[in-house]
Image (spheres, helix red, strand yellow):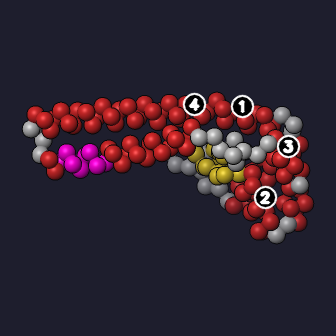
Amino acid sequence: KNKTYFVDDLDKIVIDEIFNLQNNKNYFDEIIDKSKNNEPDKKEILIKRLDILNKELTKIMDLYQLGTIPIELISERVENISAERNSLQDEINSISMPKEKMSKSEVISIAKNAVPVLEKGTLQEKRVLVRSLIDKIVLKNNEVIIHWSFV
């Protein structure tokens, strides 16, 4: 089970990460390097799962040809496998397609202008700032994982 976080605690983590982008010149490069190391793994896992589903479909068709399974069961199973295959293929395609990314100078510029917004900005201004830098935040195994928008 994931750890429970208070909103203020999560806010502090996010703000600290943004300040780290601003103050640590190497942090941007560390984020980029870390994301490059993770991307191929995810794509490989998805491709392996897609291969397993294709083999499963072949086996189901073989069983159908032998006449050992009723068509209703086969239809349902093939439909489920096809839906999962389509979902996996979409995800693989999204990983393969390069996203429009901000340059390092754009990210650093946004981070440098973050201090006044984070200290005195309205809630809406803070949201715009955070969304310009962060796609999503995932809580997994008591760890806060930030998915940056520029990677």
Q: In whole angstroms, how far apart are the C-alphas of marks 1 and 3?
A: 17 Å
Q: Going from the N terminus, do you reach mark 2 or mark 4 first?
A: 4
Q: Amino acid at mark 3?
A: Ser
- The answer to whether mark 3 and mark 2 are in CB contact below 8 A is no
Q: Going from the N terminus, do you reach mark 2 or mark 1 first?
A: 1
In the depicted structure, whether residue 65 falls above or below residue 121: above
Q: Dot 4 lies on which element?
A: helix
**Segment tinted magenta in the rendering:** 73-80
Residue at 85 percent across and 43 percent down: it is 105
Closest to the observer, 112 or 19: 112
Pointer 4 residue:
40
Q: Please tell me in which quadrant of the rendered image residue 116 appears.
A: bottom right
Q: Label for residue 105?
A: 3
Q: In whole angstroms, how far apart are the C-alphas of marks 3 and 4?
A: 26 Å
- Magenta: main secondary structure: helix
Q: Dot 2 lies on which element?
A: helix
Q: Amino acid at mark 1?
A: Asp
> Closer to the camera: disc 3 or disc 4?
3
Q: Position of residue 24 (x, y in %)?
A: 86, 39
Q: Position of residue 40 (x, y in %)?
A: 57, 30
Q: In whole angstroms, how far apart are the C-alphas of marks 4 and 1?
A: 12 Å
Work out whether residue 20 can be spotted: no
Q: Label for residue 139?
A: none
> Closer to the camera: disc 3 or disc 2?
3
- Left or right of 72 on screen, residue 55: right
Q: Amino acid at mark 4?
A: Pro
- The answer to whether residue 87 is magenta is no
Pointer 1 residue:
33
Q: Dot 1 lies on which element?
A: helix
Q: Going from the N terminus, do you reach mark 1 or mark 3 first?
A: 1
Pointer 2 residue:
129
